[in-house]
Image: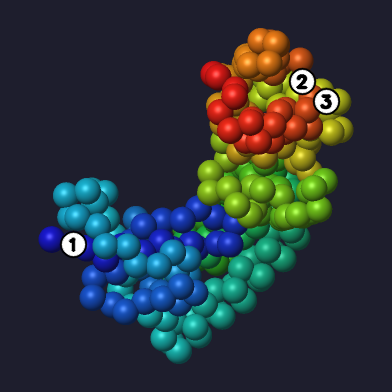
Amino acid sequence: MLTNIIGVKFKKEGRIYSFNAADLILHRDDQVIVNTDNGLSMGIVVAGVNRSESSSLTVNLKKVLRKVTSDDMRIKAENEKLEEEARKFYLEKIKERELSMKLIDVDCFFDKSKIIFYFTAESRVDFRDLVKDLVQKFKTRIELKQIGARQEARITKGMAICGRMVCCAGILQNLERVTVKMAKEQSMSLNPEKISGLCGRLMCCLAFEHEEYAGSKKCTKAFIDNGNTIIDDDKLLPEDKNAKDMEKLDEDGDFIY
């Protein structure tokens, strides 16, 4: 038996989650209401319907309840207004209590059962009194969630040195671990200013492109028929390697790996 599966995002910079579309007719960019572990949520369809065998589906796959209605849009507007009010109140209270915290984002659940405040801080912060203030003000569950520099960049976005939006807020669904070794294997300068992103950490694209570079490293030596010249790829600059790749295509099989 085949099941209709769609991909849904809840935030533009967030990951894609799979949901059971059942018999609903849905298209890319449709707004939908779905069931999640946190209750009802509003998302946007970012991947078209994919028919999959029931045996291959994720356990407890949640369902799409409906397309967004006018009432849902009204609730969304109310939640956005509540988030803005919560943001202002939060900023007032951390200033009043002299807490060294930087508010990054506020997220209100669709049914208003919980409000999450995302913040950064250079050290551990005792925010118990702040939570009491927020609960007393908004009469709902409150969660304060400390995030790192990379998560902050993903939420706030920005332009990377390549001239495009930072990868973490664009093409990447998950934040992979990035190491200096990846920069070395891609023949990049180890100057921190050149391999660091807006967050001050190693650029996400180092991990995104690493697999391609690692694959090319497996072919470290090549023999050229005319003279059996040995070429060590590790000693070539990236542009030289690209030139050799073009020569390989032109020679139509003269390179043996």
Element at label 3: loop
* Along the viewing direction, whichever of 218 and 29 lies nearer the viewer: 218
**Residue 100 visible in the current orientation:** no
Q: Nearer the viewer, mark 1 or mark 2?
A: 2
**Callouts 3 and 1 close, C-beta under 8 Å:** no
What separation in Å lies between label 3 and label 1 (alpha carbons)?
50 Å
Element at label 2: loop
Q: Quadrant of the C terminus?
A: top right
Element at label 1: strand
Residue 219: quadrant of the picture: top right
Q: Residues within 10 Å of mark 2 (few under 14, many from 20)?
A: few
Kind of residue indicated by mark 2: Leu
From this view, report whether residue 223 is shown above or below residue 58.
Answer: above
Q: Residues within 10 Å of mark 1 (few under 14, many from 20)?
A: few
List x then y, in percent, for residue 60.
23, 52
From this view, report whether residue 90 is shown above or below residue 183.
Answer: below
Kind of residue indicated by mark 1: Leu
List x then y, in percent, for residue 199.
75, 41
* Along the viewing direction, whichever of 32 and 257 lies nearer the viewer: 257
> What residue is disc 3 on?
189
List x then y, in percent, for residue 183.
72, 26
> What residue is disc 1 on?
2
Q: Earlier in the sequence, mark 1 or mark 2?
A: 1
From this view, report whether residue 176 is shown above or below residue 223.
Answer: below
Direction from residue 241 to residue 50 in the image, left or right? left
What separation in Å lies between label 1 and label 2 (alpha carbons)?
51 Å
> What residue is disc 2 on?
236
* Along the viewing direction, whichever of 169 and 100 lies nearer the viewer: 169
